[in-house]
Image (cartoon, rainbow, N blue to C red):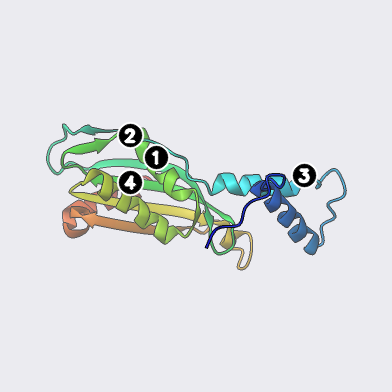
Amino acid sequence: MSSPTMNPLLAPSDPLEEGADLAARMLAVLGFDLSGPELSATPGRMVRALKEMTTPPAFTATDFETTAEPGQLVLVRDIRFVSVCEHHVLPFTGLAHIGYVPRKRILGLSKVARVVHHCARRLQVQERLTAQIADWMVEHLDPAGAAVLLSAEHTCMTLRGVGAAGSRTTTSALRGVLLDDPAARAEFMTLAVSAQ
């Protein structure tokens, strides 16, 4: 079965424009008057902001041959991140602490933060985000172990519903020796928690 021929005079519309139209309808349903200058451009800004917050930035993972002693922990702490909760499409913000025990390769330090931002920039839940970062480290570096600890404030909990301002959620994902070896796990947790 052949596909229908597209009329060249009917160019496809811009998805962001379509999104702005839908956002305007949603705001109107909520009772907002978009006819004034204060809110007339709001739907377009809403859609562009949400697109930016849910589009993972591309990056190249620069890694190097390690000169670390066998079993040495590499820990990058206090990586600030922003993600968007897939349940309410509201942001959650926090700190990530990423540790790994290299075998042969180490990741450029700035790239550790880029991994966090790459995984966070999408509709997410914190538990899955934590696991995705740990799995990325394992897949790309083949370390002896990897560990991720995230602590975040979720605006879906602090700005609505229960209104629990200041509450934080902490999640962890441990792989390899940082899961299986109690001493290695304790070293990571002690150093990561002392950062908070």
Disc on the earlier residue, 1 or 4: 4
Relative to residue 47, is residue 136 drawn left or right?
Answer: left
Q: Secondary structure at mark 2?
A: helix
For disc 4, the neighbor class at 10 Å (few under 14, some 14 to 19, many from 20) is many
Residue 44 picture location, percent across and down = 71, 46
Q: Amino acid at mark 1?
A: Ala
Q: Nearer the viewer, residue 108 or 98?
A: 108
Point out the frontmost of discs 2 and 3: 3
Task: Tell me which corner region of the image, top left, top right, bottom left or bottom right, holds residue 65.
Answer: top left
Verify CB contact (< 8 Å) between mark 2 and mark 1.
yes
Q: Which residue is mark 1?
A: 113
- Disc 3 marks which residue? 41
Q: Earlier in the sequence, mark 2 or mark 3?
A: 3
Q: Earlier in the sequence, mark 3 or mark 1?
A: 3
Mark sitting on residue 109: 2
- Which residue is the site of mark 4? 98
